Amino acid sequence: MPEHTRDDFMHTLTLDQIEELTGLPAPTQADPEKERAYRELAWENVKVDEAARSEQVPLDGEVGERP
């Protein structure tokens, strides 16, 4: 996923762009409160995904040769 900031998620990206990036279904005919909640949830999901990726341990087949 390309690097985006919280500001991008909250103000710049469209709901369709966020849905495409995250896979999180965008609300249809969202009022401002639902849209804000969706944007927050999408941003939180991105941060959780990034944290999970950084904590992953490679599988044995993916580890380089051992000395």
Image: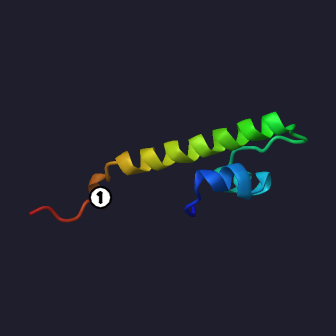
- The residue lying at 58 percent from left, 41 percent from top is 44
**Residue 40 quadrant:** top right
Q: Can you identify the residue that label 1 sits on? A: 61
**Residue 18, relative to residue 28: is it above or below?**
below
**Amino acid type at mark 1:** Gly
The quarter of the picture where the C terminus appears is bottom left
The quarter of the picture where the N terminus appears is bottom right
| Left or right side of 45 for 37 | right
Give the number of marks: 1
Crowding at mark 1 (Cα within 10 Å: few <14, some 14-19, many 20+)? few
Report the front residue among 20 and 58. Answer: 20
Q: Secondary structure at mark 1?
A: helix
- The residue lying at 69 percent from left, 49 percent from top is 10
| Left or right side of 27 for 18 | left
- The residue lying at 36 percent from left, 46 percent from top is 55
| Left or right side of 53 for 12 | right
**Residue 52, relative to residue 14: is it above or below?**
above
Residue 3 picture location, percent across and down: 55, 62
